[in-house]
Image (cartoon, coloured by chain):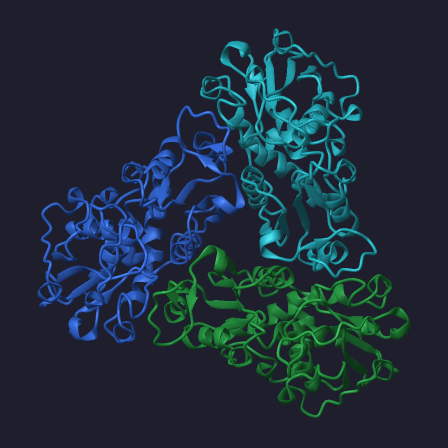
Chain colours: A cyan, B blue, C green
Amino acid sequence: MKNFSSISDIEDINAWIDEAKSLKSNPYLHKNLGNNRTIGLFFFNSSLRTRLSTQKAALNLGMNTMVMNVSGDAWGIEFEDGTIMNGTTAEHIKEAAAVVSQYCDIIAVRAFPTLTDKVKDESEYVLKAFMKYATVPVVNMESATGHPLQGFTDAMTISENSQSKKPKVVLSWAPHVKSLPHAVANSFVQAMQKMDVEFIMTHPKGYELNPQIVGDTPVVYNQEEAFEKADFVYVKNWSSYKDYGKVLNTDPKWMITQNKLGNAKFMHCLPVRRNLIVEDAVLDSENSLVIQQANNRTFAAQLVLKKLLENA
Amino acid sequence: MKNFSSISDIEDINAWIDEAKSLKSNPYLHKNLGNNRTIGLFFFNSSLRTRLSTQKAALNLGMNTMVMNVSGDAWGIEFEDGTIMNGTTAEHIKEAAAVVSQYCDIIAVRAFPTLTDKVKDESEYVLKAFMKYATVPVVNMESATGHPLQGFTDAMTISENSQSKKPKVVLSWAPHVKSLPHAVANSFVQAMQKMDVEFIMTHPKGYELNPQIVGDTPVVYNQEEAFEKADFVYVKNWSSYKDYGKVLNTDPKWMITQNKLGNAKFMHCLPVRRNLIVEDAVLDSENSLVIQQANNRTFAAQLVLKKLLENA
Amino acid sequence: MKNFSSISDIEDINAWIDEAKSLKSNPYLHKNLGNNRTIGLFFFNSSLRTRLSTQKAALNLGMNTMVMNVSGDAWGIEFEDGTIMNGTTAEHIKEAAAVVSQYCDIIAVRAFPTLTDKVKDESEYVLKAFMKYATVPVVNMESATGHPLQGFTDAMTISENSQSKKPKVVLSWAPHVKSLPHAVANSFVQAMQKMDVEFIMTHPKGYELNPQIVGDTPVVYNQEEAFEKADFVYVKNWSSYKDYGKVLNTDPKWMITQNKLGNAKFMHCLPVRRNLIVEDAVLDSENSLVIQQANNRTFAAQLVLKKLLENA
């Protein structure tokens, strides 16, 4: 593994889950691995869990950490090739990525989509430019179309909580007031497709995810029907993919309630808007796994960093 | 001590002062205590001394540090219970505090008051929500109504500079152009009430602090009279408590001058506006203790962190 | 050396270059030198290379690092003496510099010029105030009129790439849309004047740098003529010094092209605007040294910090 950009970089998800669990039970075992190694965390967007858990993962491995908000701390970055840079951007990604590779042994990047320009977003121009011009491994801390650190975390959390041999996992859309990215939903779908689970999705019509990602994962448009006998309900809002970036539906009937959930475990990547996405009763119940998911972010990241360091 | 939220968390202030002095003379003695322990510093407001001294204190104990400006770096946080989160806040404190507890062994928080909503400020809704929902110790880095790291620092500094058995300490209000919080003044009053000092306050009428905090500490409305035979004059502006958050008085006669001070030591928590709060001659004299106070912030914080780590 | 504020603080540039090369080949040899020592990096302006390379340099020496954006994180700082601080600034540099000296063993500062007030900029009021009121060494991370960490890096990079005994080095102005500082150009001139090189400058009329810095370094106003038989072409835009801070010329004929350069090595401090300052073909060629320069920033800073720590 040269970079960690997508769920498809995970060759054997069960082996990875086992190793991440092992790191969780003994986080400081590889504390010398990161000796004199430095990770740079570069944020084009806000972050709480990813910012802290990725730092924590690096610290557990004995790495040095350097964290930057690209926009506020440094210069506007140009991603177009061949352009005459007489506008607002002051530094080209060709230099930026090569330069930070001089100071960092691993580069981690967060860059959200525009949600207005589908072609640009799907090109993953920020993440791919870092991967192209950096001379060290790049880690995706949520890009335009994927959030694989989250997706792998979620697979690990399901594995930790699974009672049955082949649990039923449902990804459910829920309403939100703003236009949100598809990244978390995409990576969750891809992670579940690699797991030995019964996996289906439910969302209103018009909210179909990228068909290339969905593949033959069944979609059930009736939420109640989808939740029947579910072991895990993973909830996330996203904006329309077809009518790109649009909010087509805010129907509160899609909100997750305790009544709908029954005994299923509730999962969400956070941050979550209470009583809009999910009612308080669910988050405050013992069936909510959201804090365990947040905790597992550390060990998912730690495994990725460990693999990249060992490969260096 | 589960959390450090207020001066009232200090059981025996003289024992604490002795121990803080001991840390000052040997700052790295407990460098292994923080091994594989992480502190998260979360700022809702600006900070210079608190930001650096708390980091330094943690580093002296061998801890890892992670620092965040909550507003700029992460998501808007919701503190109301039961609300439908369809506005500007994206994450509820219930999740935020529980989540950061997964990455941090100690959480330190700075959150200033509104100075417009007295009930809300006095509820200490930010600090108390962190204490309620975090699963690790919480340290107050200045909340709506208290700044106990500063108050304890000030007690330590007075102890270091005390010539007489029972020094006379005066807390004096001084004029300012903006509406400032009561936190530093409150914690100083509470710290002095625990010390073996002769403690009085002086300020214009209308600037009475919260009577529950003042208790039976004498107030002398004549500044000159209050300063007579003072050993220490601690200066701070605050806005009105009764006429909540209002600037009622900007009379330059209340500014601290060398002439008024005589041989008394001058103290201030900083930042201080020169020639508005206090004239240059005072700050530039040998009787000013402000830099020593700033230095002692490290050891006050280090003692608090040490106690919380030992208690963990 | 008490502080590192200017190229003139380098006594023997060849000895420094040798030592910086030695750090580059063995970066962790002095990892114990920074044990329990802390550097504070204070940014009044944006930074990418300087921010990361100075942190990296400190980490290589085993130091702790604390990084702050002064404006966003802390308080507005007052630099005028004797002023009544009833405006927007909340803390005087007298306190700020003395206070951070309590937490940091070395203070590094970046503060760009106004480019509107020549007298103020040339007074170097920010850097000099830090040097005056700090009680620990101060490092210039680019001030109003100089960027000596960059200048020394550039001397080191030329030394690494020099084929001939006495290479010809040309500093060339190139066009830009914004008004840029003179700091990098000034420090490069000063560094070259200390080196055993044939050094000339080229720029349009009206772009003469401060004559006190230029001294007897030849200026050739014809760029093509200046580039004849050049071994190194160092490129930078700056605004007019005489007509202070003005953009007098944006003639694209001054842009650096592969054709103009021939076999000369291309150097630039970065960030660089592609196809405005220099065409893609140059930056993408093997004759570009810009990434090597960026890498050498670490070892230039590491040498400066090492000298300051050893001197402490």
Q: Does B67 appear above or below A112? A: below
At horizontal 77% and vertical 40% (from top left) the residue drawn is A120
Looking at the image, residue B173 sits to the left or right of residue C269; the answer is left
Looking at the rendered structure, the number of numbered marks drawn on it comes to 0
Residue B173 in view here: yes
At horizontal 36% and vertical 68% (from top left) the residue drawn is C95
Looking at the image, residue B306 sits to the left or right of residue A55; the answer is left
* Front position in the image: A109 or C80: C80
Looking at the image, residue A290 sits to the left or right of residue B212; the answer is right
**Quadrant assignment, res C156:** bottom right
Image location (x, y in percent) of residue B226 = 10, 63
Q: Does C23 appear above or below C71? A: below
Image location (x, y in percent) of residue A195 = 71, 20
At horizontal 40% and vertical 74% (from top left) the residue drawn is C80
**Quadrant assignment, res A149:** top right
Image location (x, y in percent) of residue A9 = 75, 34
Q: Does C208 appear above or below B30? A: below
At horizontal 35% and vertical 42% (from top left) the residue drawn is B308
Q: Does B89 appear above or below A279? A: below
* Front position in the image: C244 or C73: C244
* Front position in the image: A150 or B11: A150
Residue B25 in view here: no
Image location (x, y in percent) of residue B21 = 28, 58
